[in-house]
Image (tube, grey):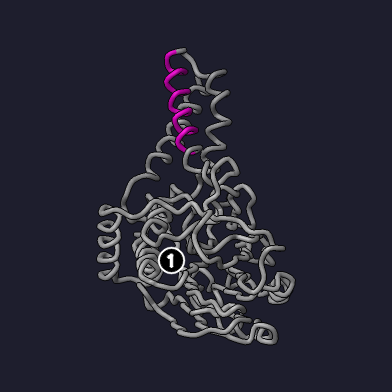
Amino acid sequence: MIWTILLCTLTGLVLAATLLSFVRVAHGFFRSFSFPRLQIFAVAVVLLPLIILFVRPMGLMEVTAAADLATIVIQALSILPFTPLWRRQSKAKAASEVGDESVTILSCNVKMSNRDYDATLRMTREGDPDIAVFMETDQPWCDALDSLRETLPHVVAAPEDNAYGMILFSRLSLSDIRIDHLVMDEVPSITVTVTLRDGQRFRLHAVHPEPPVPSVDSVGRDAELLLVADIVSKESLPSVVSGDLNDVAWSHTTRLFQRVSGLLDPRIGRGFYNTFDARFPFLRWPLDHLFHDARFALVDMQRLPAGGSDHFPMLFRLALTPNTAGAAEPQPEDAEDRAEMREIVAESETLDRAAIGVDWEK
């Protein structure tokens, strides 16, 4: 009897968590359920044979097994695009086929309280990026990373002591530089025009919006992502958006971001590349992203050592090609997407609170 109660309860919980993840409310309570899809899927798979073996009577067993199977199917369909079983969204190019039209971008959330500066410097030099974006950088982190100017001389810095600071280093020439606070005064983003070695240019948006937490709205994060998406949709130059987006690759918000921006996700058809939490292997999901214009091809994508942070850095190499041939572009936005974006952005204009988590690293 106790096994029946326990297994039925667990099945109900994983099914409820699965269904709540699809509720379209900009609040952390609902948004948070999108994160552990891999974990919920794994738990549901383990539960299924236990239900068949131990739940009695038979009628209850069948209902419970059906509920658990529904969880497995829903979660599997949500994460399947991020496996090699799915068609790749970003077209590929071999390293031997590219040259001055390529760019390597490092995205690294250092974790502000982490003071292992040497590990981050070592990882960056070994990765040898053309552009390195570091997040959660306060002034001590900016000072510690300053030696990177030797090979990455173009620098845009927005240090903060609230875990939302950001600094960008580049080997390539930068222009049209902006430091914006799109939604909240405490949360900067960086936008630059990058000139490649062959003279081509693209726009790079480095972002690190709020994380969703179950007790607070997620309007700040959602609105910042959608504002960036809207900006990108109007740009004539090819665009790249990179950073710790504090959203998982398979969430409704990320997919809405893609439809509005028209950008591609190189993870689709390739793998999860889970970057958070680096400290707990079972509690990991993909939070650190790069989205790119369909004119870019993916040359390489790597997850690098964490170096004391709770995030793994990501290293991407892209090549800017003449056209979009070979890419599987995302579904275009529709009127409902645009209406949802306007609603969330309008709600963000009335926010009257500090950014979430400004005291976590103090």
Residue 281, image x, y percentages = 64, 50
- For residue 343, what is the image quadrant? bottom left
Q: Is residue 220 visible?
A: no
Q: Is residue 250 above or below residue 162?
A: above
**Start and end of the magenta stretch?**
59-75
Q: Choose between 319 and 129: the one closer to the eye.
A: 319
Residue 289 x, y percent position in the rendering: 53, 61
Dominant secondary structure, magenta: helix
Q: Nearer the viewer, residue 252 or 48?
A: 252
Mark 1 Cα shell of 10 Å, populated few (<14), some (14-19), many (≥20): many
- Is residue 217 located in the magenta-colored stretch of the structure? no
Amino acid carrying mark 1 in the image: Glu
Q: Outermost residue, top direction? A: 58
The residue drawn where x is 42% and y is 59% is 212
Label 1, on which residue? 210
Indicate left or right for 171 with 329 as reference: right
Judged left or right of residue 79, residue 27 is left
Q: Is residue 88 left or right of residue 347?
A: right
Local SS, label 1: loop
Q: Residue at x 38, y 78 (%)?
A: 185
**Residue 193 seen in this snapshot:** yes
Residue 124 lies, in percent from the top left, at 69, 73
Q: Is 81 placed above or below 333 here?
A: above
Give the tally of numbered discs. Answer: 1
In the rendered view, tell whether residue 111 sits above or below residue 199.
above
Task: Tell me which corner region of the image, top left, top right, bottom left or bottom right, holds residue 100.
Answer: bottom right
Residue at 30% of width from left, 60% of height from top? 341
Query: Looking at the image, which residue is at 74% across and 71% down?
Result: 126
Most foreground residue, 342 or 299: 299
Instruction: Tell me residue 194's x, y (percent).
Output: 53, 79
